[in-house]
Image (tube, helix red, strand yellow):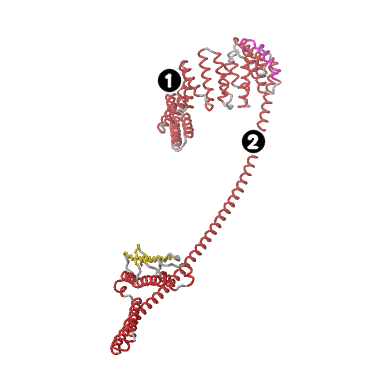
Amino acid sequence: MLSTNQLFFVMLFAFAALFLRPQSAFSQNDLKRKIDSVVSGLENMKFQEKRSSYFDICDLIMRAGGNKREELFNYAISRDSSEHARMVFYETYSKVFSRRGQTDEALELKEMGLELAEKLKDIEYEIVYHNDIANLYIYQNKPDKALFHINKAELLAQEDKYKHYNTSVYYNRGLLNNILGDHEEERLSYLKMWEYAEEMENTSRKRFLLYILVDFLSQVDHPEELAKFTEVLSDLYEEANPNMPEGHMPIKSIFEKRSDPVNIPKLKKSIRISDSLNSLNSLTFASIALAKTYEKMGQPYQGVQVLKNIAPKIDTTNKPQLKLYLVSELSRLNAEAKNFEEAFTYLREETKLRDSIKSERMQKNLAEMEVKFDTEKKERKIAQQDLQLEKEARQKNMIFTGLIALGVLLIMSFFFFRNKLKYQRTIAAQTEAIQQQEIRELQQENKLLALNSMIEGQEAERLRIAKDLHDSLGGLLSTVKAHFTTIQKEIEELEKLNITEKTNSLIDEACLEVRRISHNMMPHALSLSGLKGAVQDIASNLQEEGYLVTLEIEDLPSLDKTREVMVYRLIQEIVANIRKHAEAKSVLIQVLARKNDLNLLIEDNGKGFNFDQALKKGGIGLKSINSRVQFLDGHIDWDTKEGEGTSVSIKIPAV
């Protein structure tokens, strides 16, 4: 039968179990969600950023309690099983086994992690794993295997960026030499360890490494080094925690462990050396350790004397915590020695010192708070000023940005309207140019139309005159000749005078001239055979007149009647000029079709002429020829020189 109290605690335990279990599950789920959150952001991270995130996951794993760490460890690997992730996770989780004393399990994980580090060529983690594995082999008392990994780590830690890992290398060497019993090598290893640690900031690891060195030196006969490094370690502790009482410093335990009659000679030597080196911390701790040794031996008064010997020196120092520690021990030992009056005196001094230290500490804290308050006040004021300046700067930037935007807008507007105006002017100019061109084209068309009409009129008039000459004057002359023949038979006297023969000759010549004029005005060959036949007719006439003529006609295009007549008249007029002025013996006439052009070439071997002078004189023939070519939208080229003949090259569009 359970008692009332037992029943109460059972119910309380059951309630707590029911209440805390969901809370624990929630904490575990919460940690998993945090791991998920970290893993989800890994994809776009660089190498070092990923490593930092893996460290965050490791912190989450170590925050879990008990067996939950293993669950979180496995969960983290399930979320990211990359070689990089496993290399980091194995190193962290192996510490769980190390703390439990499960060195084989820890070694297994660390060996796996080392293999990954070597595969990834991650030198930093190779060094870490070699140091960790060496430490575990030292724990298992396997010095050969430990030495192998220590040497590997030391070799890898030669680069400057890895040299801080040598603190672990030489710490392990010190431990290894300890189990091998080589204390001198152990001392040298710890001193080398401190050489690298000394460059570190004042962290707990730095203080731990120096603590190892001081602890070792307190066990061997090197009082100078002990005094020196005790002072350094005390300064580091005071710097890290100024309010820590001297009696609570970890150094105290180092010396108290030596409170044994066997160590009296070493303690006395340490006191003497510390005194000579003015190492007050070492002097105080060694003296108190010796005093406690005498106390254990039942000689507290001897201990009192030891402490009184150093009291004057401690009084002169500005180390109230050290003085308080000494006075407190003097009060206690005097009480043990039944010297209650002195014990009470030292107790009052102790109380006074405590109050003084407390007051001083309070004042110091108040001063620090005041400084912090003033600093915060100044910082707040500076922050307000910065905010004001930032606000003003922001306003200025806004104004400046607005002005720039306005300026850009104005410039853009200016260029826009200028370009628009320029475009409008260009369009207007183009429109005007087009209109002028259209006007010129209309004028040209009208001019050509008028000229065409004029030419057609001229041709019609020539045709009429030719018909009249042929029909009227030609017939009339024929009638005259017939009548004259009749008269000739009847009048014998005229024959005697030889007038009839001459008159007949003149009449025949008049008939020929009328026929020639009529033919020139309207050649029958052009009407009957086209341009080719007409040009051949011109060549035949020249040959009849005694000229050596070369005629070439090829692929003549089909021309409208007006252009055909104009081309014929053009050739006719050039040939007429050759007859009148050239005094030539040979003539070349070429009429050739080239693509959409009609090419004319007329050459003679006559006397030639000065083209520029002839043009200035206003020769009707030249002007007429040039006008006809211009009317036909063609191009004419005169090549002539006095005494060298003349060459006329004409290119006329066929359409």
Nearest to the observer: residue 326 or residue 394:
394
Nearest to the observer: residue 594 or residue 112:
594
- Which quadrant is home to the C terminus? bottom left
Query: Could you tell me the amino acid type at mark 2?
Result: Lys
Give the residue drawn at x 39%, y 76%: 453
Where is residue 593 drawn, in percent x and y? 34, 64
Badge 2 crowding class, 10 Å Cα cut-off, few under 14, some 14 to 19, many 20 or more, is: some
Where is residue 253 drawn, in percent x and y? 58, 18
Q: Can the viewer see residue 200 in this picture? A: yes
Q: Main secondary structure of the magenta part?
A: helix
Query: Could you tell me the amino acid type at mark 1?
Result: Asp
In the displayed structure, would residue 250 be above or below residue 461? above
Give the residue drawn at x 48%, y 17%: 147
In the displayed structure, would residue 278 be above or below residue 495? above
Say which quarter of the image contains residue 493: bottom left
The boundaries of the magenta stretch are 294-314
